[in-house]
Amino acid sequence: MGRRNMKTFIWKDLSASERRNALARPENRRDPAVLARVHEIFDDIEARGFAGLADWAIKLDGHAPTQIRLDAKTVDAARAQLSADDLAAMELAVENVRSFQAAELPGDGPVIAPKPGLSLQRVYRPITTAGLYAPGGTAPLFSTLIMTAVPALVAGVPNRVCITPTAKDGSIHPMMIAAGAASGLDAVWRVGGAHGVAALALGVLEGVPAADKIYGPGNKYVAEAKRYATERVSSLAIDMPAGPSELLCIADETANVKLVAADLLSQAEHDPDAQVILVATSRAVAEAIEAEVALQVERLPRAQIAKASLDQARAFIVASLEEAAEVSNLYGPEHLALQVAEVDALIPQLTAAGTIFAGTYAAETFGDYAAGPSHVLPTDGAARAYDGITVRSYLTSFVVQRATRAGAAAIAPAAARLARLEGLEAHALAADFRLEI
């Protein structure tokens, strides 16, 4: 029998500061030692290029970085190691992601004419180079490869550069290769960690341009490397803060205890720094779910990881769905599962979540693998300001402004007056002169 790990709180009894503290992410996600190591890695790779990357990869992974070309021979060999059912499941996931992302691909906006002769239109363009991070090592997340590479393909990004850590023996799971080919990639680089992120940011991978934007989740080293990369390279963007996984589940007396426990553990098994939160409408509901978690965790191959994560777990007892929404909105979870009778009454009260799984049959696992939306979602409360990855994440947009002489005449006097109020005479003259030609 596993021990119960969740620290339990009565929401209404907590002060505002106690609520924030109870909902805090694990402290070691921003460990100063992690920050120092990431800075050291960037300094060395910027100074020594690929040679520095190779040294860090050998030191931390045990293997030098290599590029795996996804040619027909390599892909066929990888597919031969997988069953027909394996391949069918992967291809279903790729197609669902492709269909969903294609449906959300924006076209150029309407032409807006605020005055006769003045027209404005927003147009979209794909970025040039997307750096895609697919976690590997202890768990080869080929699902993340699909969730980052397929939206990039749909968006029309010309350079899609994928990196992934290897297993301890230096191998890459054959599904990484099969899924990469199915997702439109030409190659996968066998390198990961903060040093892999630095390689994407600094452009040291041979034959590969530096990334314009880096996508994908990772452990605390990867998350910190992505954040720091935007400081180091001023032109670089990242998709969002996407670190160790999170799930918050709101459960009432109608919740299926077995399913809630399984959903919580599905995130806890990712990483010792993952965090799961239970919000229950009674202590009896919370205790039943915690007991089921204790039973199920013992059956998991990654039980040790899950138990370490459960040390960071929390349970909150609330008196109403309004209180439950308050807890969730303050936390801003990456994943939010709703196991309550009144799902439709609760959803309008929710303001911050990476994605919501609404009702008994909406498993978080479906979102992770095959439903269609990308599973790369904001963590650490960033859901209050960031979306998860969409096809739009791979696009930039700008407005094309056109004016005839009549359009200029309609707007130039006001623009010139406002410019002079700000003391910017050159701006004003640039407007005035349009009326002299």
Image: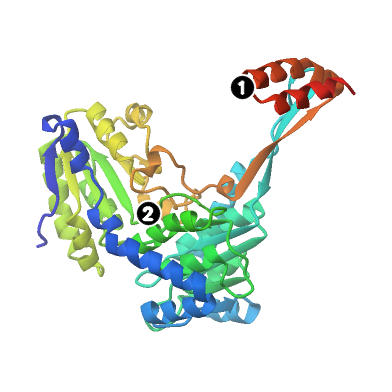
Is the residue 397 above or below the residue 242 in the image? above
Instruction: Give the CA separation, mark 2 to mark 1.
Output: 55 Å
In x, y percent, where is residue 250? 26, 39
In x, y percent, where is residue 229? 47, 58
| Quadrant hosting residue 212 | bottom right
Q: Which mark is residue 365?
A: 2
In x, y percent, where is residue 117? 82, 21
Is the residue 244 above or below the residue 380 in the image? below
Split into 4 quadrants, where in the image is the N terminus?
Answer: bottom left
* Residue depicted at 39% across the width and 69% down the height: 40
Q: Amino acid at mark 1?
A: Glu
Horizontally, residue 425 falls left or right of residue 9, namely right
Is the residue 304 above or below the residue 310 in the image? below
Split into 4 quadrants, where in the image is the C terminus?
Answer: top right
Crowd tier of the residue under label 1, counting other residues whose Cα lies within 10 Å: few below 14, some 14–19, many 20 or above: few
Horizontally, residue 246 falls left or right of residue 107, namely left
Q: Which mark is residue 422?
A: 1
In x, y percent, where is residue 339? 28, 40
- Comparing labels 2 and 1, the label whose residue is closer to the camera: 1
Q: Secondary structure at mark 1?
A: loop
| Quadrant hosting residue 203 | bottom right
Q: Is residue 86 visible?
A: no
